[in-house]
């Protein structure tokens, strides 16, 4: 990628309140990623095997590593838009693999109740993909010289 292609991904506006969304998304993903390693049987490899995902021994640590890395990047506001993309993918897969059965077996309202954090993380990540890191981000510090 050339600088001309990277600039739009780092540019961000001066919105100060974006840090609230960054904190919410970053802390949740960082925490969940760490827990996939600390409590692998319940939240990592074991959980992935239980819900029928292929190759859970690989996917558990792989997803946990992405959650830790991208959660940290979001907290720092560094490459925020790039970090939001895998987080969006993680949330789409999480909703599809864990909430479809709940919808089919327990109904709409039970699915909505069980997926409230999933929706918050999905929409928070989408917000960060669209807006970038905001005023108090490393993206803002890096891209500032590029703005005219």
Image (spheres, grey):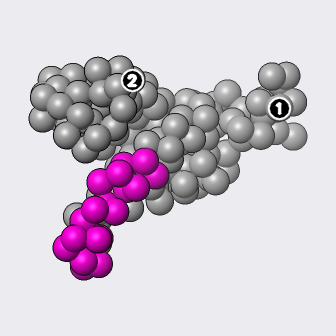
Question: Percent position (x, y) of residue 66?
Answer: 42, 28
- Whether residue 80 is visible here, answered yes or no, is no
Residue visible at 64% across and 53% down in the picture: 130
Residue visible at 17% across and 31% down in the picture: 46
Within the image, what quadrant is residue 69 found in? top left
Question: Percent position (x, y) of residue 73?
Answer: 48, 30
Magenta region, mostly helix, strand or loop? helix
Q: Earlier in the sequence, mark 2 or mark 1?
A: 1
Asked whether the beta carbons under mark 2 and mark 1 sit within 8 Å of each other, the answer is no
Task: Say what secondary structure mark 1 lies in.
Answer: helix
Q: In which quadrant is the N terminus drawn? A: top right
Residue visible at 29% across and 70% down in the picture: 103
CA distance separating discs 2 and 1: 27 Å
Asked if 7 appears above or below 23 in the picture, the reply is: above
Task: Say what secondary structure mark 2 lies in.
Answer: helix
Residue visible at 29% across and 78% down in the picture: 108
Question: Percent position (x, y) of residue 91?
Answer: 42, 49
Asked if 106 appears above or below 117 in the picture, the reply is: below
Viewer-proximal residue, 5 or 136?
Answer: 5
Q: In which quadrant is the C terminus drawn? A: top right
Nearer the viewer's eye, disc 2 or disc 1? Answer: 2
Left or right for 147, reference 21: right
Q: Which residues are magenta?
A: 92-111
Question: Percent position (x, y) of residue 72?
Answer: 41, 29
Asked if 73 appears above or below 122 in the picture, the reply is: above
Q: Tag on residue 62? A: 2
Q: Please give the residue where the numbered disc 1 appears in the rendered image.
A: 5
Left or right for 107, reference 13: left
How crowded pointer 2 is (Cα within 10 Å; few <14, some 14-19, many 20+) is rated as: some
Q: Is residue 121 magenta?
A: no
């Amino acid at each position: 990628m050339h600088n001309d292609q990277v600039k739009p991904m780092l540019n961000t506006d001066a919105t100060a309140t974006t840090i609230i969304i960054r904190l919410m998304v970053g802390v949740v993903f960082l925490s969940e990623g760490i827990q996939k390693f600390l409590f692998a049987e319940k939240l990592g490899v074991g959980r992935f095997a239980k819900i029928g995902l292929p190759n859970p021994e690989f996917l558990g640590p792989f997803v946990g590593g992405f959650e830790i890395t991208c959660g940290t990047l979001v907290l720092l506001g560094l490459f925020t838009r790039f970090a939001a993309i895998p987080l969006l993918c993680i949330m789409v897969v999480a909703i599809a693999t864990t909430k479809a059965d709940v919808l089919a077996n327990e109904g709409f309202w039970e699915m909505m109740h069980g997926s409230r954090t999933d929706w918050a993380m999905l929409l928070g990540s989408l917000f960060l993909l669209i807006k970038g890191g905001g005023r108090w981000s490393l993206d803002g510090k890096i891209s500032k010289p590029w703005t005219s």
